[in-house]
Amino acid sequence: MNGATGPGAALAAAGVTIRPAGPDDAVAGVTPRWVAFPETTREIAAVMRVSAAHDLAVVVAGAGTTLHWGRPPERCDVLIDTCRLNEILEHEAGDLVVRVQAGVPVETLAEALAAKRQELALDPPLEGGTVGGLLAAGLAGPRALRYGTARDLIIGITVVLADGTIAKAGGKVVKNVAGYDLGKLFTGSYGTLGVIADATFRLHPLPAARAWVVWPGAAPDEVLAVVPAVTASQAEPSAVELDRPDPDGPCAVAVLVEGAAAAERARAVRDLLGEKARVAAEPPRWWGRLPEPGRPGPGPSSEPGDGVLVEIRTVPSRLPGLFAGALARTDAAVRGSLASAVLRVALPAETDPAAAAALVSALRAELGDAGRVVVLSAPEPVARRVDPWGHVGGLALMRRIKDRFDPDRRMSPGRFVGGI
């Protein structure tokens, strides 16, 4: 492992399980030299201290569901795999609080909480992910309209910084980095500030009942015309989602109503949407998932992650212009929240790179300063043509924060905004 005194030997001596990396460990095409499997926060710190001493670049991986998002790292020496950080450390059911290690699968956490009639109301759009990956990618699902995103639900965090320092913020503080809200900073940071070891979340009781109102087909302008009335209605929907798999076909809309008298409130929403809408006990198949690229029909289709995936965040008033403009001139599949104005757009892998780049440019031009268009993932020919993040007004501040937490640029270097 690189000699008796080299970094490989130092990693092996740190008391953490280490193995040589292989092609299957590549991060967006960049293969690390070693993979580390820490089981505790202190073991993460040991890996980070060795990495600091030998100037090793570190990338963190959970289940790998979003590891291809963002830019490839400029370098990657050590991949920290969090699969053994898999414990639910505390669940204070009476206080609606849970503390969980970063490698716990989201589905495992959901099952444990459901046994106590509670939930973490984030609904990530990818199956199989971990809590740490959910935070690092800043994922949230349809019910962000009612419950907020991960930044709203996280109330405490333990992180390991690039030099091996263990820092905590939020509940039960042991050591805090003065002046920073670590939970909010690390959420959506793509692993560029440090390693998330565990997180504490505010929970919600499971709703007494749920009902979905499904409107199977309508033109985008019809859908957008009625959404404000649905969102503002006394039915108090938890989510209003759209699915447009084919730009030449109709949109489907689904509205979630939760809590007391859910069925009665759902019928009120149905009346707002019209006679084609129906009340259902289960969500439609596409609910809360990423859009599926490619037109429906016979033959093979692209798998999620093979094509171009773009996220749009704006305000509801700008959605009609997008659907009448750039989104009307593309074969992209569109899915997401109408009420929160967060849409994800998917193009198949075989899309011409110039056309994909043109769509991103058109979306950014139409939104201007009224939103963000981020290329979450794209094949390499597309990635060469487009900045995944676009213009970011707070980039100078973000660079200063990066310098504060990782001055030597060893944490996922280059993967985030502006090459951070």
Image: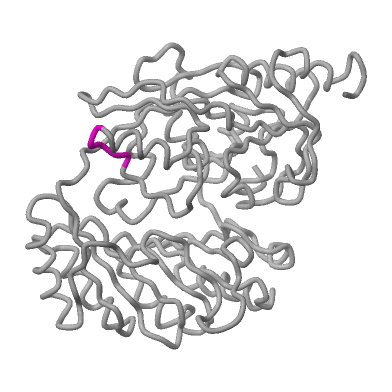
- In terms of secondary structure, what is the magenta stretch mainly? loop
Is residue 228 within the magenta segment? no
Left or right, 4 with reference to 204: right
Q: Nearer the viewer, residue 223 or 205?
A: 205
Magenta region: 116-120
**Rendering coords of residue 119 (x, y %):** 29, 39
Q: Nearer the viewer, residue 277 or 158?
A: 277
**Rendering coords of residue 214 (x, y %):** 25, 72
Q: Is residue 346 above or below residue 140?
A: below
Left or right, 213 with reference to 312: left
> Dividing the picture into quarters, in which one does residue 182 lie?
top left
Q: Where, quadrant-wise, is the C terminus in this rendering?
A: top right
Q: Where, quadrant-wise, is the N terminus in this rendering?
A: top right
Left or right, 10 with reference to 194: right
**Rendering coords of residue 177 (x, y %):** 48, 19
**Rendering coords of residue 9 (x, y %):** 84, 17
